[in-house]
Structure formats: C-alpha cells, structure tokens
Amino acid sequence: MKTDNIDLKRESHAIFKYLIPNDNDKKFKAIVNAVGLQYISPNSQYPLKVHPSDYYFDISNGRVLNEYQLIYITNGRGVFRSNHTPKEGVSVRSGSMIIVRPGERHSYYPIKSTGWTEYYIGFEGKTFETIIELIGLDKGNNICDVGLNEELQQLYKKALDTASNNGVGVMTLLSGIVCHIIGLTSFIMRNKTIHASHLEQNIEKAKILMDERVTESIDISHLASDLNMSYSWFRKIFKEHTGLSPAKYFQTIKIKRAQRMLLETSLSIKEISFKLGYKSSEHFFMLFKRHTGYTPVSYRNIRTK
C-alpha cells in the first residue's frame, strides 16, 4: 500500500528560524534554539545548503549538537544513524519522530527515491531535561513511531509562526509549545492503542498535505489516487471522519488562513487572494463572505478595531 510518499511535484525548500536567547530568556532554563520545516523532493540534494554552520552537516560524518532535537517526518522515508544505532542506521518512515540528544553524534537523510517532509525543533535547558527524564524520552530508541497526527504537525507550524514573531515573550510561548510536543509524543507512545488504523492514517496524511498546500491548488482525485483509494471512497470516508467533503475541508482551511492574513498582515485583499491561489479576487471575495458572513474588508475592519 502506497502511504510513505506522495510526490505532488514541489521543489525542495526550507522555512526556518534560528533564535538567539537574551538574558531574560536564559533565566527560564528553557531555551528554544531552532524551528524549521524542510520539504525535500525526490532525487534532491540533502541537506539543503541554507543553514548556519553549527547545524549544517555532511551525511557521512554527521554532527554533534548541544541541544535536543525532535524531528517529525510527515511524508517520505529515510535513514537515521547515531552512536546508538547499527552502523547502517535505522529506517525512518512517514509518521516517525526522531529524537536527537545533546552530545550524540548523528546523521539522517531521506531516501533519494522518496524525499521527505521534515519538521524540527531544537531546544535546551534544565526545565526540558527534567520533563524528558520524567516521561522517559531520555532513554531507549532514537525513533518513535507516533504515526501521522495533525495536532502534532500543527504544533510545529505554530512554533514556526511564533518564532517568526519578534514580540516580547516569544521564548516563553515557544517553551510551552515544546512542552506540548513532548507531552503529546509521550502520550501517543504510552497509549499504543490510540495508534490509528491504516485508513485513519490516510485521512491524517490527506489533512496534513492539504494544510501544507493551503496556498496552492490540489486535485482531490489525484490526492485520492496517491493514497491508493478511489475518489468516491476517499470522499466518503474523509467526510465520515471530518464532517466535510475533501474539497470543502480544503476550502475551509484556505479561508482560515485568509482570516489570519487579514488580521496579521497589511497585505491587500488582492494580494491575499493571489497568495492563496484563488482564480480571482472576486472569487475569493465571494467564498470568504459565504464562509464567514463578512466581506474580507469588513472582517479586517471589525476585528482590528
């Protein structure tokens, strides 16, 4: 069954934020150093040459970090190696959480034929060390099979959005998100019975892919085919799980993204329409009013007063 990789023809790219803590941040003893997302298309270079020297690594030699990293793979397959794995490494697949510990030499990479989608967050400090020790993530394997989980993926995206904000207190918010990620990972691993069925994992994969492509257009029938389902069956079970058809679900998350952009940016209605992949600003205007009861202009004016 084809579930590890769905290639919707995207170019490799990375979105990331490396943070420099101030003196106040250091007092909390819970520092977040790095947050990022990398999409690596099949047969592409890895790692991308866009990261600071402290984080960039050669696959054959690996690297050593003075922090924890939690790396969540939502698409594709790969290999992870560390001091604690066999020389050839261990397999990484869609739904794997890679745990990297401070002082541990490690390396990881996607398989050429599949590429992968990788979310990561790096952190340090006594607060995190205590939490990780208490819940047992400081021992055992480097790979946790947490499965595809939209809530987990959204936490990484929230961390990336938060890290991009230069406001006061960002580090405190990020520390809370890291604790949530650690807690959710632990909960999933402690409650193996909540691991979703193959069918439910396909629905989670579809939801994650839609969210990652919210600024683009997705052919739902192609998405169903890539999940090894007929369109009619995919539409039926997707609606049973979410309450919405795939097309309506995709449109809903587009509108939610538009609402955020209206409130958090100064982009014009036309620019937002273009960035979200609508055919025209008139089409966006009509759909936005149908979903929210407001025009984009009135929504921005009411919520920002």
Image: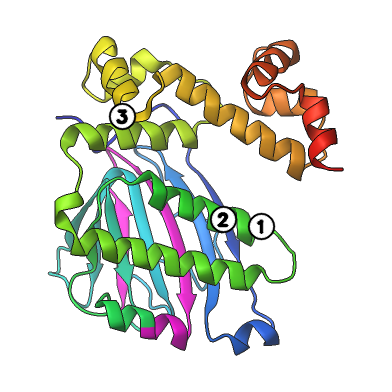
The reply to whether the magenta stretch includes residue 187 is: no
Viewer-nearest of discs 3 and 2: 3
Q: Relative to 52, is 46 above or below? A: above
| Chosen colour scheme | rainbow
Identify residue for label 2.
Answer: 160
Mark 2 secondary-structure assignment: helix
Identify residue for label 1.
Answer: 164
Residue type beneath disc 2? Leu
Mark 1 secondary-structure assignment: loop
| Residue at 75%, 65% in the rendered image | 167
Which quarter of the image is occupied by the C terminus?
top right
Residue type beneath disc 3? His
Magenta residues span: 104-130
| Residue at 83%, 42% in the rendered image | 304
Identify residue for label 3.
Answer: 241
- 3D distance between C-alphas at marks 3 and 2: 28 Å
